[in-house]
């Protein structure tokens, strides 16, 4: 309790806002001023009036907040909270791929470094990837999509548009196997299955809904389902249970934990606010180019 009070007091003194991803630890979500998916967090970072953003998520998310609000101080309570998928492609590797496909439009998942975004035409999150391909890239025959092969495959399945896919993946979501879903369905035959598009095609095909984390929270809140099998990172169950006390949630796999999302805790948030650490910085030239690609996404997301 004492630590929560200290964080609240310092937050007021520093004119800070705490943004937390849906996969954060329960106590971190509970202290967040806004809890959401990558798209929601980007939009919140772009519009907040606060002077300081304490970003409780992985590094690329905090970096995106800094790119969208360069005049603000963006702090990440643990700078080692990275996203292994985002690190599966470098700007150099993307440049080589672009050179092999000079006419292709380049779409990147927001789970990329600022350097990679600076090499792309357009950005997307799991909430709007289909829309970006259908609307923003409707007239393009050749599209490079990086880095998630599963999200890319999902978009191709929905839109019918073939893309040149980088072979990246999320080490947490690939731990969820079709057999896990089948077993949960056997145990809970009335439950709906929701999965994240970072899951494999086989898992997605066993799902009733394939959605971003925010889309999942919206679906379970507004649909009539009473029981839900959840195929994504386990942190989301806290929010689902909190918002839906009458419903029951079953994790598809107990192993679906993103260790990086769990690196942030209350002690580190307090430390970040006390010492104004660790400040996220993006070189100006990279930031300007990456911003153009994120802004194009936000134009379609208002
Ligand atoms: P969302 O944008 O759906 O929250 O997903 C982010 C992420 O990192 C999923 O692993
Ligand atoms: Fe990256 Fe996967 Fe963790 Fe999301 S769950 S932050 S994609 S490693």
Image: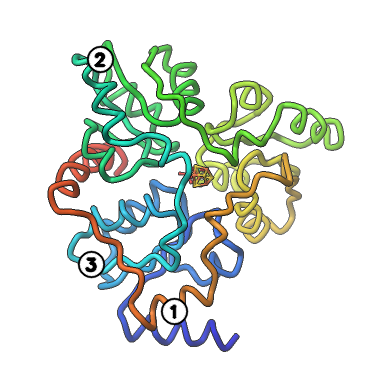
In the rendered structure, which disc, 3 or 2, sits on the residue that comes first in sequence? 3
Q: For this rendering, which residue is in front, 291 or 272?
A: 272
The residue pinned by badge 2 equals: 100
Image point (45%, 52%), residue name: 82
Ligand 1 within 8 Å of disc 3? The answer is: no
In the rendered image, residue 118, in percent from the top left (x then y), is placed at 21, 39
Which class describes the residues within 10 Å of circle 2: few (<14), some (14-19), or many (20+)?
A: few
| Whole-number angstrom distance, CA of label 2 to CA of label 1 | 46 Å
| Whole-number angstrom distance, CA of label 3 to CA of label 2 | 38 Å
**Image quarter of residue 96:** top left
Kindly report which numbered mark, 3 or 1, lies closer to the viewer in this rendering. Answer: 1
**Image quarter of residue 293:** top left
Kindly report which numbered mark, 3 or 2, lies closer to the viewer in this rendering. Answer: 2
Please report contact status of discs 2 and 1: CB closer than 8 Å, yes or no: no
Can you say which quadrant of the picture contains the N terminus?
bottom right
The residue pinned by badge 1 equals: 271
């Amino acid at each position: 309790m004492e630590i929560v009070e200290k964080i609240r007091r310092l937050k007021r003194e520093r004119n800070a806002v705490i943004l937390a991803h849906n996969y954060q630890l329960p106590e971190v979500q509970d202290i967040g001023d806004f809890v959401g998916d990558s798209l929601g967090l980007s939009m919140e970072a772009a519009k907040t009036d606060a002077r300081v953003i304490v970003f409780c998520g992985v590094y690329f998310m905090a970096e995106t907040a800094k790119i969208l609000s360069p005049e603000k101080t963006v702090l990440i309570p643990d700078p080692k909270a990275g996203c292994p998928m985002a690190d599966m492609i470098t700007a150099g590797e993307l440049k080589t791929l672009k050179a092999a496909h000079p006419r292709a439009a380049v779409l990147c998942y927001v789970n990329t470094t600022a350097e990679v975004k600076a090499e792309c035409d357009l950005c997307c999150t799991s909430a709007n990837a289909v829309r970006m391909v259908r609307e923003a890239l409707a007239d393009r025959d050749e599209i490079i999509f990086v880095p998630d092969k599963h999200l890319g495959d999902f978009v191709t399945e929905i839109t019918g548009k073939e893309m040149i896919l980088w072979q990246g993946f999320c080490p947490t979501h690939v731990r969820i196997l079709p057999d896990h879903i089948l077993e949960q369905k056997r145990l809970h035959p009335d439950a709906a299955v929701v999965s994240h598009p970072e899951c494999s095609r086989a898992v997605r095909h066993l799902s009733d809904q394939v959605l971003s984390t925010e889309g999942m929270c919206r679906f379970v809140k507004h649909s009539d389902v009473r029981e839900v099998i959840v195929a994504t990172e386990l942190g989301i169950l806290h929010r689902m249970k909190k918002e839906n006390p009458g419903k029951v949630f079953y994790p598809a796999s107990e192993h679906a934990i993103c260790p990086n999302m769990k690196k942030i805790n209350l002690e580190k948030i307090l430390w970040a606010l006390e010492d104004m650490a660790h400040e996220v910085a993006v070189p100006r030239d990279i930031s300007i180019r990456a911003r153009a690609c994120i802004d194009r996404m936000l134009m379609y997301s208002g």
